Image: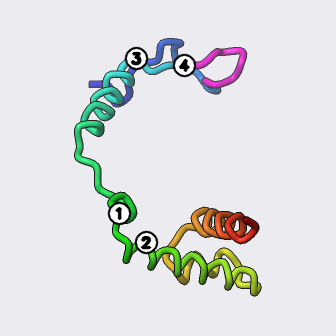
Amino acid sequence: MQSKPPSSSGPGRGPLKAKTGVRVPLGAHSISLVITLRWKKLPRAKSATSSFDPFKRQEFDRRNQEIYTLHKQGVTVRELAQRYGLSEKRVWGICTAERKAEQE
C-alpha cells in the first residue's frame, strides 16, 4: 500500500519549479471532492447577527463604538483584539466602519 498517491510527473525534487512543471497527485482530487460535498451538506450555524434582534444589534453597536473610541485614544489593535476576544482583522474592520459612519 502506498502512503502518498503517485505523482503524474514522476519523482524528484522541486515540483513547483518552472522547469519541472506543476505536479498534480493522481488520487488527490477524489478525496477533496468528497470532503467538499460533505461540507456543503452540513447545516450552517447562524451568526449572531443573522436574525434581527434589536437588543443584540444595540450591544454590538455599543461595543463597536467603544472599540473605536479606545483606538482613537491610542489603544493598539492587538490590545483591543485580546480585550474583546476578536481577531485583529475584525477590530480593523470595526474601526474602519465606525470612522466612515463618523464622517457621514
In primary-sequence order, the first of circles 1 and 2 is 1
- The residue lying toward the viewer, choosing from 22 and 100, is 100
Disc 1 to disc 2: CB gap under 8 Å: yes
**SS for callout 3:** loop
In the displayed structure image, the side of residue 48 where residue 84 appears, left or right? right
Disc 4 to disc 2: CB gap under 8 Å: no
The C terminus sits in image quarter: bottom right
Let me know if residue 26 is in the magenta part. no
Cα separation, mark 2 vs mark 3, equals 49 Å
Cα separation, mark 1 vs mark 2, equals 8 Å
Question: What residue does disc 4 label?
Answer: 23
Cα separation, mark 4 vs mark 3, equals 9 Å
Instruction: State the residue at coordinates (30%, 34%).
Output: 35
> Three-letter amino acid code at disc 3?
Leu
Question: What residue does disc 2 label?
Answer: 57
**SS for callout 4:** loop
> Three-letter amino acid code at disc 2?
Arg
Residue 32 drawn at (x, y percent): 35, 30
Question: What residue does disc 1 label?
Answer: 52
Question: What residue does disc 3 label?
Answer: 26
Instruction: State the residue at coordinates (61%, 24%).
Output: 15
Q: Is residue 102 above or below residue 37?
A: below
Q: Is residue 5 above or below residue 66?
A: above
> Three-letter amino acid code at disc 4?
Arg
- Disc 1 crowd rating (10 Å Cα; few below 14, some 14-19, many 20+) is few
**SS for callout 1:** loop
Cα separation, mark 1 vs mark 3, equals 47 Å
In primary-sequence order, the first of circles 4 and 2 is 4
Magenta residue span: 15-23
In primary-sequence order, the first of circles 2 and 3 is 3
